[in-house]
Amino acid sequence: MNKQDDLRLSFEFFPPKTEEGRTKLLKVREELSELQPEFFSVTYGAGGSTRDNTKGIIVEFKNQGVSVAPHLSFGGDDEDTMKTLLQEYLDAGVDRIVALRGDMPSGMGGAFQMVYANQLVAFIRKHFDNQFHLEVAAYPEIHPEATSYDDDVRYLKGKFDAGADSALTQYFYSPDAYFYFMDQCQRAGIDKPIYPGIMPILNYRNLIRFSDNCGADIPRWLRKRLESFGDDIASVKAFGIDLVSELCETLLDNGAPGLHFYTMNQTDPTATIVRNLGLD
Ligand code: FAD
């Protein structure tokens, strides 16, 4: 079996807000399909704010014969609403969910319930048995609200104990963070696959802002390097492709079971990185 055969690729999108964005995403999806991912996932706005958009694009992809996974969290919804939505996904032929607690949307206050991801996994297993493959989130650099490293690993174990099948990680640029985390997960008794999340580098300022919010570390040397390119977008992109291709190679050479790309709804740089790795 060659390298491609046993590695899993998946690509993440966010739901487009406009008709133009939708048309563009359909084309990106087609281009990325050439790389034969196991599935495409579509994010869920904080508190369920993109419920209809996420469902719309997921069902559209599914109707085109593509394997998909909507991201899902309770947000402000009650159990009946969640059951209905999950049943609608099943009826559309969707058999994979990325189950999350999600973040509190700004201005939503009391309507948001902190339903932890392990509770959502248990809820789906209780009402839908094993009809969905369940992915959950994992944080090699530890979730920003975690009470400790070990607690975060313990809660990840709780998600698997509740019935999750595999995990997708937050992105990171330090492979050691992932390898150490994998060791800790193994020690905690987790034996399910944990796929590294890969964020291609497109725009320095957006990356810094986004990373500060979600607790992903941009090492000082990398900040300085990216800073030095200033507004030279082409150099940022070329450097980013080399750096992220090397990161992926290191991860795969050392046992990562596949890669989950945060595509930012763009064919490139994801496609170039995958081709650099010889996975096309
Ligand atoms: P949980 O696993 O529930 O953990 C949340 C925090 O609580 C952690 O600090 C954990 O240590 C702690 N914890 C966990 N379980 C318990 C428990 N039972 N009791 C007490 N504490 C506990 N957000 C979106 O809004 N939409 C998306 O589409 C989306 N997609 C994502 C995809 C990936 C691959 C990743 C890595 C993240 C994504 N996020 C998304 C972000 C995610 O929703 C946030 O990071 C959120 O803050 C935590 O979600 P979670 O499912 O990891 O939460």
Image: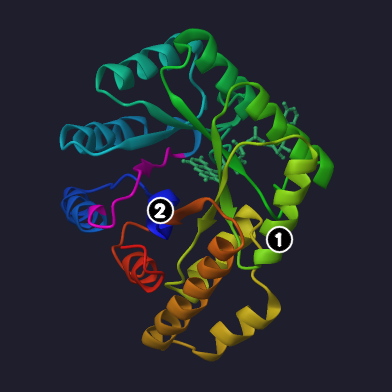
Circle 2: element type: loop
To which residue does mark 1 refer? 177
| Image quadrant in which you'd find residue 92 | top left
Q: Is 40 covered by the magenta stretch? A: yes
Q: At 32% across and 22% down in the image, what residue appears?
A: 89
Q: Is residue 155 left or right of residue 243?
A: right
Q: What stretch is highlighted in magenta?
A: 33-45
Which amino acid, mark 1? Answer: Ala
Residue 126 pos. (x, y %): 54, 9
Q: Is the magenta stretch mostly helix, strand or loop?
A: loop
To which residue does mark 2 refer? 1
Q: Is residue 48 above or below residue 246?
A: above
Q: Earlier in the sequence, mark 2 or mark 1?
A: 2
Q: In this view, does 14 lie to the left or right of 246?
A: left
Q: In this view, does 160 lie above or below 222?
A: above
* Measured Cα–Cα span from mark 2 to mark 1: 29 Å
Q: Is residue 242 left or right of residue 42?
A: right
